[in-house]
Amino acid sequence: MDYNNADFKGKQENNIFRILYIFKRSLDEWGEKNVNTLREPEFHITYMPFFMNIDVSGISNNELAARMGVTKQGASRIVKGLISCGLVTAKKSKTDRRSSMLYLTEKGKQFQADAINKFDGLINGYIEMAGEKKYKTTIETLLKLIAYHDIHNH
C-alpha cells in the first residue's frame, strides 16, 4: 500500500499518528487513575515504563536507558524520581565505575506487584474486547514498527 496526499484526505480517522496520540493519552489517564489508587503520591505515571523494566535482580542505568531508547541523562532524571519515591536504590557497579546498578527496594517490589495486578486487569480487558489473537497481533505489529524505526532512525 502506497499512501499519497489524496489517500490521506478523508482518512484522518485511521491516521496512525492520531491513533497513537489518543491511545497514549488514554493509557496515561488510565495510569494516573489506577496508579493513584496504589497510594504513591510522588510517583508520576511517566516513571512507569522505566520502573517496570527494573526487576528484582536489578539493571544497570546504562542498560535501562538503552532498553528505553533514551540517553543515560534522560533516564537519570526518572531514576532520581524513583529513588526519591523510595521505590528504587542505586549502587555503584562493581564491574564498571561509570555505571550504577538499580534495584527495587522492598517498597518498590510491593508497588511493582500491585501495579502488575492493575496491568493484568487492563490487558485482560483488552483481550476481552478485541480477542486474544488480535491483541497478540497488535503487540507483535507494534514491536515490528519499533524495530523498523530502530533500523531507519539510526
Image (cartoon, rainbow, N blue to C red):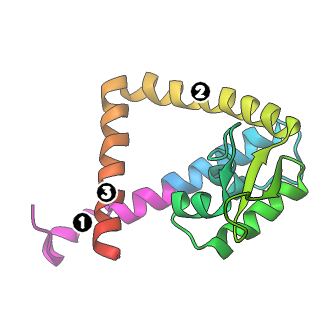
Q: Looking at the image, which residue is at 25% across and 62% down?
A: 11
In the picture shown, does residue 53 fall above or below 69? above
Q: Is residue 130 magenta?
A: no
Q: Nearer the viewer, residue 19 or 40?
A: 40
Residue kind at label 2, given as amino acid type: Asp
State which mark lies toward you, 2 or 1: 2
Under circle 3, the secondary element is: helix
Give the image quarter of residue 81: bottom right
Quarter holding residue 75 = bottom right
Residue occupied by mark 3: 145
* Residue occupied by mark 1: 10
> Which sits earlier in the primary sequence, circle 3 or circle 2?
2
Instruction: Report the predominant secondary structure element of the magenta stretch.
Output: helix
Question: Tag 1: residue type?
Answer: Gly
Identified at 90% across, 58% down, the residue is 84
Q: Tell me whether circle 3 and circle 2 mark residues in contact (CB < 8 Å).
A: no
Bounds of the magenta segment: 1-22
